[in-house]
Image (cartoon, rainbow, N blue to C red):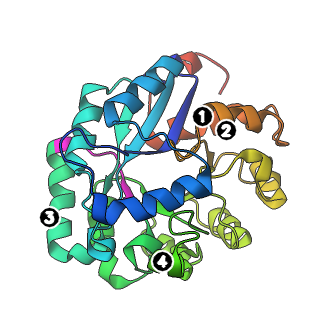
Amino acid sequence: MDASKLVAIDVHTHAECSCRQPYDEEYARPYDEAAEKYFKFNYRPTIPETVAYYRERNIGLVMFTVDTEVSTGRIRISNEEVAEAAQENSDIMMAFASIDPHRGVMGVREARRLINDYGIKGFKFHPALQEFQPNDRMAYRLYEVIQDAGLPALFHSGHSGIGTGMRGGGGLKLHYSNPMYLDEVAADFPDMPIIIAHPSWPWQDEALSVCLHKPQVYIDLSGWSPRYFPPQLVQYANTQLRHKMLFGTDFPLITPERWMKDFEDAGFKDAVKPLILKENAVKLFGLTDRSQEGGTP
């Protein structure tokens, strides 16, 4: 991926519709309908349609599925389908895998295979949906594989739009997504980059503290329109954490057009905007940006 050819890099997009398996009506429909109501959207593209959408806009993307088979019974889109799409569109797309830590040794084997055979570039976790605290030692075997491969791990944090409004919140327990659990993970795995996904309401200050304290921790700004970001998040993005904030949308729940339009007037400094939109991701992922070659350090 030559980042110099891209307008931005979206580090948080979802594989919504598989081209290889039918839609899981029984277990997916209730959660999807609740999410559509919460986020006010009803567009669910296939993986190739998402790639085409981003290619048309000249925006790089990181895509992943979410493995919730153990907790919700929902059949996941295979990590292989996402990875193969990234291989076919490597100029614009990277694939993260999602493996529920409850899969144990089989999950560890899957992670190794995806890294070795498919070139997976990172891993996505959703503690509330997968029902685990990130600092649970059950997950450490997976983290060891990820750290040994030099790859990042991305964790959902804060409130979950998934399950909001459903009876009992769809069974999700929000405390699993408190970003303070990631402080222990970051201390125990200092060579594994960690991305805290979303403004972490109602624990925004905890997320900022962990990100400030642990050098390998980043925050992606997905899942919210920037016009609603907590003021302290914008403050730190403009100052001490300006090199650790990443552009993300949560597509298709939020589109890059809407996010970037609202970003312009959300109080971010002009000097910081390029860092968030692309430059911080270029550094995190070790990408090539030829527009920076020969420039001022």
Residue 10 lies, in percent from the top left, at: 52, 38
Q: Indicate whether residue 274 is drawn in magenta.
A: no
Label 4 sits on residue: 172
Identity of the residue drawn at 58% across and 70% down: 165
Q: Is residue 81 visible?
A: yes
Which circle marks residue 29 in the picture? none
Q: How far apart in space, not on screen, are marks 4 and 2 (Cα)?
A: 27 Å
Which quadrant: the N terminus? top left
Q: Which residue is label 1 attached to?
A: 256
Q: Which mark is residue 259?
A: 2
Q: Which residue is mark 3?
A: 109
Contact between marks 4 and 3 (CB within 8 A): the answer is no
Kind of residue at disc 3: Arg
Residue 122 painted magenta: yes
Estimate the x, y position of residue 11 in percent, counting from the top left. 50, 43
Foreground mark, 4 or 2? 4
Q: Which residues are magenta?
A: 118-124
Q: CA distance from mark 2 to mark 3?
A: 37 Å
Query: Gap between marks 4 and 1, in whole Å?
Result: 27 Å
Q: State which tag comes first along the sequence, 4 or 2.
A: 4
